[in-house]
Image (cartoon, rainbow, N blue to C red):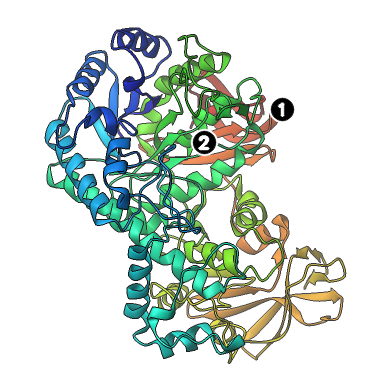
Amino acid sequence: MKNLYIGAAYYPEMWDENELKKDIERCKQYGINCLRVGEFAWGKMEPEEGKYDFSWLERVVDELYKNGIYTVMCTPTCTPPRWMLNKYPEMRRVMPDKQRTRVSSRCHVCKSSPTARKKNAQVVEAMAKTFAGRKGIIGWQLDNEIYPSEGCYCENCKSGFRSYLKDKYKTSEALNRAWGMTRWSLEYNSFDDVQPPYPDEWRHPSLCKAWWDYQCGLICSFVNEQADILHKHGCENVGTDMMPTNSLSYYSLNERLDVVQYNHYDTADKLYINAFAYDFLRSIKDKPFWVTETQVGWNGSEYSENGYRPEDNCYANTWLPFAKGAQMNLYWLFRTHPNGHEIAHGALFSSAGRAYRVSEEVKKASDDLIKCKDFLEQTKVKSKIALHYSSTATNTFAYAPILKNLNYRQTVIDKYHAAFRHYNIDVIDTPHGFDGYEVIISPFLASVDENGFKERITEWIKNGGTWIVGPMTDIMDGNVSKYTNSPYGFLEELAGVYTKYQKPIDNEVFKAKWNDGEECGIGCCFDAYEGNETTKSLAQYSAGEFAPLSVVTERNVGKGKIILVGSVLSHKDLLKLVNKTPVAEASDNVILTERSGVYSGIIAVELQNKDGYIVLDGQYTELISSRQLSGRVKVKPYEVLVLKK
């Protein structure tokens, strides 16, 4: 990792040019060394069709660079100017009510519109010719928080959807079989019969997921067209800022991009969610990720919300991504807009240019990052444990959750990732390789019918890996259809079990015990297994109708083993299966990350606004305070300790 960047989104088009020098002084005073510009400024870049004016933006980039401030340049394709959307109404999305979006805010564009694609290419080409290789520009952001939402229902998108289905299924008969359309006599006579799912219908899960997959594919091509233009002109560090959910696959969208970019706006009490996100982002590409947006104080539109941030919460929020492997943390936004849709949103500075209390915390974080720069740049986060978090599972459970009120992402965070707050762990999707991992945990991985997963995971186990799998893994194919010969696609065979009973309903009746008689905490859903002569039962139901059948089984496969889990285990019991040593002993409110490379050490971040502790195994230098520490060390509310061994 070279260079660390801390900064904000900046909108020079909103301000008189004489404000730039004042804002540069504010940057220098508060340790800001990077600003993100251009993402909504298409109207000023192209005031008339085909007549581009980037001179004002060139002056901004050059002036920032003269003062030691770098720029992330953004393409403005999220907000075509009003004159363009009025002249070419076919660029605008059609909503489920068949009305085109009104020109009222942003994100108006239909991703399949040939006109929109053409206009995008033209403005990105013009930007690339102007800014490629320009000093001070360290990377590019494509569009803004690009996301399918409900998609576009124009005739062009509908036609594209039908072509997508035809390419995938070849015949309507094959589609009918895959989706089970004989139910309720819903068979399609041809692909022309297929309509997108509408929000006011009781919607078929297979149709919904197919529509979503099609929209996600459109977005990938929409982004890649821009990336290809920038790459053609030699532009580097091209990415697109994405939101927390994995329903738009991070792996697919970033496949042809250079740097993973991430926006989040979690409230003060939910910083732990970002630890999960960063363990996921870090694993996608073999390079540091960028946090391109987070709130510095409060969120807002025409009113403020997600309110008060306790003292030093912003400081911890700034540090956590760097601890987990980021190169950049940018806030939204630098200076509050004096008018418009987000007039009440918090920022580093008010519309009058005055700092907030939290601005001082950003300055403090910037100063402390400089103290730790060499350690951060010369070390990396390396993990021997991986946890699966799947885009396919996200979308499968969105339309067919099986368990009432199942929130797949939150379940993976709370029930699994939270157990590893004192461990290095990578969060990975199914395309990710398995090399280097000793343990892989795969709960709620609804479908593994992709990316050669079955063959790859089997080979990895045979070579010595431990796969802790279940519950509710391998229960559906990619069409959101259950298997008919077994509850699983291949898990019964690999694990050497027969699944006698399943109950996808939580209750307080079922209990379980390990072989040694200790209680085994279970919940959420319940599968009961009978093993064969090659299978060992590790835990059995001790109360409820499934007793004494197995809830956890183990089977050796080659040099490794598969551990099949039929319920959600407590954190303690999950860690018992993993059987790995944590980075250090610490209180639950402290997140630990071990770093290694030229140096080695630990970064501890307190996230719950209360005192905590860490127990060190030797002598460490705390780089922020220059203290020499050993043994049991107190960690104050929202404190960060950078401990070099």
- To which residue does mark 2 refer? 602
Residue, disc 1:
611
What's the residue at 41%, 60% (across, down)? 436
Q: Is residue 432 visible?
A: no
Q: Does 446 sit above or below residue 273?
A: below
Query: What residue is at 49 percent from the left and 48 percent from the top?
Result: 279
277 vs 570, nearest the viewer: 277
User: Residue type at mark 1?
Assistant: Asp
Q: Nearer the viewer, residue 617 or 253?
A: 253
Q: Is residue 108 above or below residue 644?
A: below
Left or right, 256 with reference to 502: left
Tell me the distance, in whole angstroms, between the alpha carbons under discs 1 and 2: 18 Å
In-image side of 29 versus 573 (left or right): left
Which image quadrant is residue 325 in? top left
In-front residue for pair 51/141: 51
Quadrant position of residue 158: bottom left
